[in-house]
Image (tube, rainbow, N blue to C red):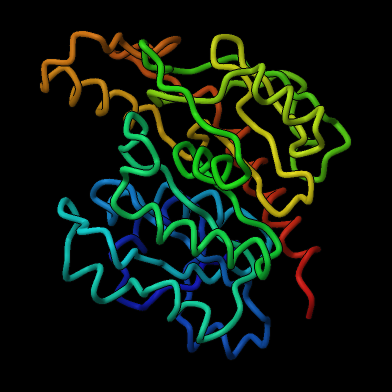
């Protein structure tokens, strides 16, 4: 349960209070344990505030994790702390030039309603995904990041009239899978997206041998699936979210005057309860285990 971070990393206190051990790179080297290098392509708004959402579940793994924070060259990151980005983040080319990546995470981004071809950094994302599929054992796409992986596989998204927003009951479809196999038969998961993939499109893709469907949510469709070669794992939900994040997003949309956004489903705004924490921990733990077992030493 160890995360390798700089000694002055701003989130050490929060991580350690959540029982995640933090050590510096120098101390990690002294332990003579090769940490798994997990690239994190973070394109969430206010990138620095989102980092804890991933470091906490990654840090619950028994493996030593070295997060490699990656920024896009073609994205302005206008809402993020530029000095923090300059200090901690590197380009994808710098990340893979230093050493190979054992795994890669592509986060969500607030561009679900925009066609992929109109997203300013889409061409850069495609180049990264092409490299990842050929050179990285497993790439995990979360929310829009998952939609981007699906698009790379030739499966396009559908923009919804009503946002899928809240906490959804989800069914495990594959108890033999290395990641979902140990998860509950039925679990809850947070969702927050304006788009997704039609069930019929994913079922057709599975029949064509392109994907394997792993989890299905009532009212949210298939939310976890993977490429047939198991190199891309897609989770269209937000298992890494805390309840307050959903509340903050709702308040943000209300402040913007978006009358089409309803309050998050199955979440009490005044007394929010996290019903998906165990799913989050198990999902990331099993993914890290899969990455470890897939990595050549």
- Residue at 25% x, 9% y is 260
Q: Position of residue 183 (x, y in %)?
A: 74, 32
Q: Quadrant of the N terminus?
A: bottom right
Residue 247 lies, with reference to residue 85, above or below; the image says above
- Residue at 79% x, 64% y is 294
Front one among 252 and 276? 252
- Res. 93 image quadrant: bottom left
- Residue at 40% x, 13% y is 267
Q: Is residue 104 left or right of residue 296?
A: left
Residue 141 lies, with reference to residue 255, above or below; the image says below
Residue 152 lies, with reference to residue 48, above or below; the image says above
Q: Is residue 295 left or right of residue 63?
A: right
Q: Position of residue 170 (x, y in %)?
A: 64, 18
- Residue at 11% x, 21% y is 255
- Res. 33 image quadrant: bottom right
Front one among 41 and 119? 119
- Res. 28 image quadrant: bottom right
Q: Position of residue 293 (x, y in %)?
A: 80, 63
Q: Position of residue 216 (x, y in %)?
A: 67, 20
Front one among 107 and 65? 107
């Amino acid at each position: 349960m160890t995360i390798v971070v700089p000694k002055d990393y701003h989130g050490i206190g929060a991580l350690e209070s959540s029982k995640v051990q933090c050590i510096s790179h120098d101390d990690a080297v002294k332990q003579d344990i090769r940490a798994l290098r997990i690239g994190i392509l973070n394109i969430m708004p206010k990138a620095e505030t989102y980092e804890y959402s991933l470091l906490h579940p990654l840090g619950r793994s028994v493996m030593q994790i070295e997060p490699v924070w990656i920024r896009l060259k073609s994205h302005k990151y206008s809402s993020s702390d530029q000095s923090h980005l300059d200090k901690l983040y590197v380009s994808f080319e710098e990340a893979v030039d230093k050493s190979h990546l054992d795994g890669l995470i592509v986060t969500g981004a607030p561009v679900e309603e925009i066609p992929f071809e109109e997203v300013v950094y889409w061409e850069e994302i495609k180049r990264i995904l092409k490299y990842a599929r050929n050179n990285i054992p497993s790439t995990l796409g979360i929310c829009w990041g998952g939609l981007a992986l699906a698009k790379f596989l030739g499966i396009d998204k559908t923009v919804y009239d009503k946002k899928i927003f809240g906490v959804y009951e989800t069914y495990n479809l594959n108890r033999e899978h290395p990641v979902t196999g140990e998860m509950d038969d039925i679990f809850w998961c947070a969702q927050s997206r304006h788009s997704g993939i039609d069930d019929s499109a994913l079922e057709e893709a599975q029949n064509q041998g392109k994907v394997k469907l792993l989890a299905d949510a009532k009212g949210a469709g298939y939310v976890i699936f993977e490429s047939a070669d198991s190199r891309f794992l897609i989770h269209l939900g937000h298992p890494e979210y805390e309840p307050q994040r959903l509340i903050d997003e709702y308040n943000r949309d209300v402040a913007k005057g978006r009358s089409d956004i309803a309050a998050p489903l199955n979440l009490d705004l005044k007394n929010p309860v996290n019903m998906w924490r165990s799913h989050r921990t198990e999902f990331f733990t099993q993914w890290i285990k899969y990455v470890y077992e897939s990595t050549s030493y």
